[in-house]
Amino acid sequence: MLKGLIFDIIFLSISFGIYFSYHLFLMITVKRTPLNTVIGRNHYFRRTWVDIMIEGKKDILAVQTLRNMVMSSTLLASTSITLVVLIINILVSQTLTTVLDKIRIIGAHNNDILIYKAFILIVVFLFSFLNFASSIRYVTHLAFLLNVAPTHKECTKEYCYKTLLNGSNHYTVGVRSFYFSMTIILWFFDPLFLLLGTLIIVYWLYIGDISHYIIPSKEKVKKSKSKNSNNNNNNSFDEENTIGELSPIELEKVKK
């Protein structure tokens, strides 16, 4: 049992390390070159959306868009809680552990550590639920703010954008927690499946976050290799970092 438990601990640590290392790399990439990532581009276009909704006074379109986002978050939040209840029911089932152990390769017996696996999975689902609930909170507030912003200067576009950004970020974190829960479920069978599932999920996320399958290579910002154009590079780098924080109207003013 001790030997199998060591494999479980090692593979779980490696899986957590791989998953969080990828997201650390993604955060750094979003900070340095936002246009090279889907998250950075979405942040930029969300600011554009806020400008259009406020300046164009498109109240109905704004409410419909936010309603769709709330419905999606509500569905995933409900799913998280439902899965938590399902996991608790599984814990009282003795026949399931024997079925899972038939596929076991190098890990410990589920009779010994099933409770710990289930606890980690429940924590992941609860963390996911918390993020979806927070996303619903911010988006609900934004529905009121967009209607107030055109008539009250105290309700600025920046405040509306930050509210939308917080709601979107919580939604993204909740979805990615959901993804990681799939690898934890594979851990119920064997730690090898946990590691394999983590690698597949990370590659899947990379395709959707950075790869040329989503962002065409010609649209990605490339750093110049010429040493004689350091000043131009610094200006481009500063503008690229600022692009995620300026609206298209403000960006045009800066360029002029």
Image (spheres, rainbow, N blue to C red):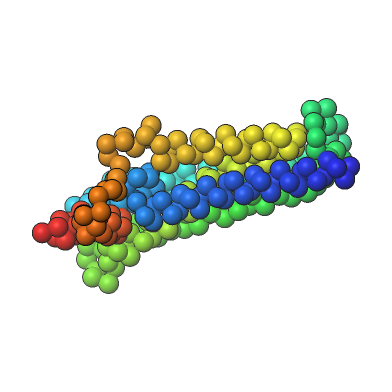
Does the image show residue 134? yes
The residue most toward the bottom is: 154
In this rendering, would 56 be left or right of 74?
Answer: left
Quadrant of residue 211 within the rendered picture: top left
The residue most toward the right is: 1
The residue most toward the front is: 227
Q: Residue at x 55, y 50 (%)?
A: 21
Query: Looking at the image, which is closer to me, 166 or 92?
Result: 166
Screen quadrant of the N terminus: top right
Q: Is residue 100 above or below residue 18?
A: above
- Image coordinates of residue 243 in percent, x first then y, are 27, 55
Quadrant of residue 242 within the rendered picture: bottom left
- Image coordinates of residue 239 in percent, x first then y, are 24, 57
Q: Residue at x 60, y 43 (%)?
A: 180
- Image coordinates of residue 18 in percent, x first then y, are 59, 46
Q: Residue at x 68, y 41 (%)?
A: 184
Query: Looking at the image, which is closer to me, 114 or 94?
Result: 114
Q: How many marks?
A: 0
Does the image show residue 59? no
Query: Looking at the image, which is closer to me, 187 or 31?
Result: 31
Screen quadrant of the C terminus: bottom left
Q: Is residue 39 above or below residue 31?
A: above
Q: Residue at x 52, y 47 (%)?
A: 22
- Image coordinates of residue 95 in percent, x first then y, are 86, 32
